[in-house]
Image: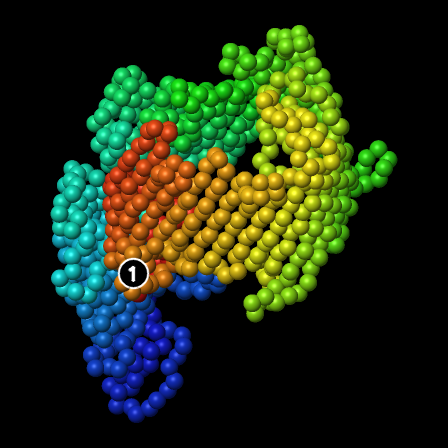
Amino acid sequence: MRRASRSPFILSPVAHGASWLVSCAMLGLACSAPAQAQPLALPSDPAALPETPASAPKPAETSVAEGASKLKSTPMLAEQVSNLPEDQGPTFVFGDRISGRPDLETVIEGNAELRRGATSMRADHIEYYQPDDLVKSSGKVRINRAGNRFEGPELEIKLDRFEGFFTAPRYRFLSNGGNGQAERVDFIDEKHLTALRASYTTCERDNEASWEPAWVLRASKFQFDLENDVGVATGAVVRFKNVPILGFPVVSFPLSDKRKSGLLPPTLGLGSVNGFEYRQPYYFDIAPNRDATFSPAIMTKRGIDLAGEFRYLEPAYQGTLRANLMPGDKLRDRDRWSYSLQHTGAINSGLPAIGNLGLALNLNRVSDNDYWRDFPVANPSTIQRLLSQDATLSWGQGFFSTAVRALKWQTLQDVSAPIIPPYDRLPQFTATYTRVDAPLVGLGNGFDWSVEGDYTRFSADRLLTNQPNSNRAFTRAQVSHPWLSPAGFITPKLQLHATNYQFDAPLANGASSASRVVPTFSLDSGLQFERNASFLGRNVTQTLEPRAFYVRTPFRDQSGLPNYDSGANDFNFATVFTENAFVGNDRISDENLLTLGVTSRLLDPATGAEALRFGVAQRLRFEDQKVTLPGALPVTDRISDLLVGASVNWVPQWAFDSIVQYNPKTKQSDRSTFGVRYNPSNYHVISAAYRLQRNISEQVDVGWQWPINDLWGDKGRDLGAGQGQGGGRYYAVGRLNYSVLDKKLVDSIVGVEYDGCCWIGRVVLQRSQNTTSSSNTRILFQLELVGFSRIGVSTLETLKSNIPRYQTLREKTSSPSRFTTYD
């Protein structure tokens, strides 16, 4: 209870002046004097307290204080409300008529207002009993506590403890805009209250007397915990469009984005593989840095699926564990399971000279070869056909780093499309020493040099790979000296590759070991020209950037060596200026070639943003490339395909990107990609792409998100990203991938979203191609009660991962300030 002060009221300058004039009039004195800035104590005789007539032009103002008040400087208003008595400050009262007795009560009538700290109260009539710190208000009562508002006919509350009751109030919470009304609200303290025979919704009330929320949760009792932002409803029913859709004996729900334990919204689905699916997740908020979700499901065509996820986040490490179990799957008539663990972090070695060790785990495994086909929407890391079990322990200090790794693959075989499994690495040891802009054996500074080593034990089923397993030791040393200037650069580089193999079975020539040493020299150079120019009425900076790259690697016969990790480099602008035509360490290509290229860009002189880029590149080969992958032919063309690329971002709304690989022999492109995107504003995006690999694939890809209301002239409002464009609007969403060669849709997503302000409806049809002869089709329904729950199948992840630049209709960007509802 707040202690009564010796001098309970301090008059404001306005009230003091009015009191002084009234006193003079009572004495019959005709005089005038300026009002005093400092407050004066009221007389101790209650009868001497003047009454301000209701017709006074300005309301009287008083303040209740406990000692002297001090102003504290601050750069901003405090969002958090202090509960310490010394931080409460004085109590201010305003009204048309103020009367009372010092140290006992104060009565305010007509436009009555009371303020203390973060609490403000308005009513027709307010009575404040100071010994009990009790406030009684009646007639259009409105109270605002730190942004949470309550309105009703009658309130009785102890101000400091915020303990009391409110009859027939309407209320609105700051954190998420949740609101409702009740027959009675009992305030337990400032953070806890109980509402009896009440309702709750996030639909904003309009001015119509017949207004009804689109959705509402009605219950016999609500318990609101504003400290943890959680509400609990007893005897609850959710009604949508005045139709009951869900009922709960007891249900808890969030009042903000804070996590909390409890039932999550169920998901419903209908598909050709699972049939009708109902999944009911339960969330465990274990700690601020740990949580878990248990998600059992019933599938009409398959049985019961038990899924779970555990996440943890510590200062030195983090990770996620997922697992699924489906006992007695009717689809395959056997138990199905999977697990996935991703972990990254550091381990304290306990030795100051060593410090921390890095640990990375990526462990994935499933029960059988058909898992990827039968669980197409499960954990993405377990629906691939190659599943890794990968563990790496690393350490680094200064210029040196090293790691030990164990990698084992699970290959999910398909009879119609078999896969040659990759090699397990049990184990792999790597070490690297790197220096940049450093001295080199008396040759001065400016050298970049490094030495790296790799020792790996490759193992796999020899019946499938048709080659022996091996222990391979690989070393690469390289040194370069870049000369850099604003006008250009030149970088000579020397590399030496040394490899040794120890096989567990003899090669075709009878050898059980092999060695290879290959040197490489390269010279990279480029120039940079710039000029000011003007195109289409726009001032730009135009660049011209020619580049020449020469590489010389002598031929070393590697045709008899097995291939464990090498593959052909893709031919594009990122790889055309590299020394080796292969990735991995089992093949080092012999090269005597010159790569020429030129790039021109148009830049905004103020921001440096790229408005246009055009580039070409081509290789000139002076000798045949004899080193190849097993089964491949040597490269004999003296002139490679021509790479041509262009990207245009002339205006922010449009973007164009293309790359063409042109074959000068056939005079046609072997591979082409063209993409265009139109994104004039939020929630308006259309993208299209054409991809061609001659005689392999030819596809057209189209994606979109667009308000359907635009078709009849309803343009909506620009409320910003994550806020939609206003209520009553439909949005078309989708992505189609069409195979020109097969003349059919490969993958497709088509859907509609409706924004009803406080609710969002989504219907999505998804078709995924599993193999050349099988596919999976699903219909996804979701009803989102904004700020409360989502009911149905989660379509958001599907839309985000498939539609370029898709934007959600609701996305909370920041917590609202309590001053947005300041009274």
- How far across and down, in percent of the image, does residue 622 sit? 74, 36
- How far across and down, in percent of the image, does residue 752 sit? 28, 49
- How far across and down, in percent of the image, does residue 632 sit? 60, 25
Is residue 251 in sight in this rendering? yes
Q: Quadrant of residue 474?
A: top right
- How far across and down, in percent of the image, does residue 371 sit? 36, 23
Look at the numbered disc 1 and give the secondary structure of its residue.
helix
Determine the residue positioned at 20% across, 71% down: 109
> Quick check: 675 above or below 479?
below
Quadrant of the image containing the C terminus: bottom left
Q: Which residue carries the number 1 mark?
A: 711
Determine the residue positioned at 37% across, 39% down: 743
Horizontal arrangement in the rendering, residue 601 relative to residue 719 (left or right):
right
Horizontal arrangement in the rendering, residue 701 relative to residue 731 (left or right):
right
Tell me the amino acid under the disc marked 1.
Answer: Leu
Foreground of the two, 465 or 624: 624
Instruction: Answer few, some or many: residues within 10 Å of disc 1's Cα (few below 14, many 20 plus, some between 14 and 19).
Output: few
Foreground of the two, 221 or 249: 249
Foreground of the two, 467 or 461: 467
Is residue 432 in sight in this rendering? no
Q: How is the image coloured?
A: rainbow
Q: Quadrant of residue 401?
A: top right
Horizontal arrangement in the rendering, residue 601 relative to residue 67 (left or right):
right
Q: Quadrant of residue 285?
A: top left
Residue ranking furthest to the right? 442
> Quick check: 265 above or below 404?
below
Determine the residue positioned at 13% across, 50% down: 242
